[in-house]
Image (tube, helix red, strand yellow):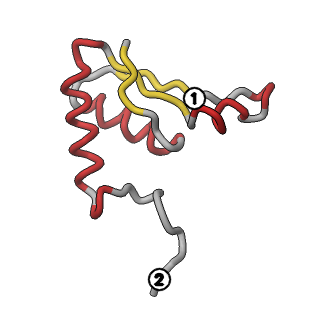
């Protein structure tokens, strides 16, 4: 298995895992959260990682890049400013 992407949070991780599954790619999601250390590793290494088989890596990377590029400005809904403007 190869590390594909480090998602920012659980929502992004599971959205990407579902997207990859729709394309027939098995993806493993691993959170770096450790209750014994109260999230210390997440603060140091990020939320976690998504891994895919080496044979699927190139296709999976393209799928993730297309997904991230499909939203305006390359941002996903939970990134950035949370202020409601209106």
Q: Nearer the viewer, residue 17 or 44?
A: 44
Q: Residues within 10 Å of mark 2 (few under 14, many from 20)?
A: few
Residue drawn at the location 29% of the way across and 31% of the way down:
20
- Tell which residue pokes out farthest to the right in this image: 36
- Earlier in the chain: of badge 1 and badge 2, it is 1
- Residue 70 vertical position relative to residue 5 in the rendered view, above or below: below
Q: Is residue 60 left or right of residue 4?
A: left
Q: Position of residue 16 (x, y in %)?
A: 36, 37
Residue 35's image quarter? top right
Q: Is residue 75 left or right of residue 43?
A: left
Quickly name the residue at label 2. Answer: 85
Q: Is residue 67 left or right of residue 50?
A: left
**Answer yes or no: do the residues labelled 1 and 2 have beta carbons within 8 Å?**
no
Mark seen at residue 45: none
Q: Nearer the viewer, residue 63 or 45?
A: 45
Residue drawn at the location 40% of the way across and 22% of the way down:
3
Q: Position of residue 61 (x, y in %)?
A: 25, 31
Mark seen at residue 31: 1
Distance from label 1 to label 2 (Cα)? Answer: 32 Å
Task: Point out the image quarter for the N terminus.
Answer: top left
- Tell which residue pokes out farthest to the front in this image: 44
Label 2 SS: loop
Q: Position of residue 27 (x, y in %)?
A: 37, 23
Label 1 SS: strand
- Tell which residue pokes out farthest to the bottom in this image: 86
Residue 28's image quarter? top left
């Amino acid at each position: 298995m190869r590390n594909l992407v480090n998602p920012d949070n659980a929502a992004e991780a599971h959205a990407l895992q579902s997207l990859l599954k729709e394309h027939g790619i098995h993806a493993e999601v691993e959170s770096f959260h450790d209750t014994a250390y109260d999230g210390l590793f997440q603060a140091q290494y990020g939320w976690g990682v998504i891994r895919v088989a080496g044979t699927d890596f190139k296709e999976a990377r393209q799928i993730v890049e297309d997904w991230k590029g499909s939203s305006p400005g390359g941002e996903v809904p939970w990134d950035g400013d949370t202020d409601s403007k209106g």
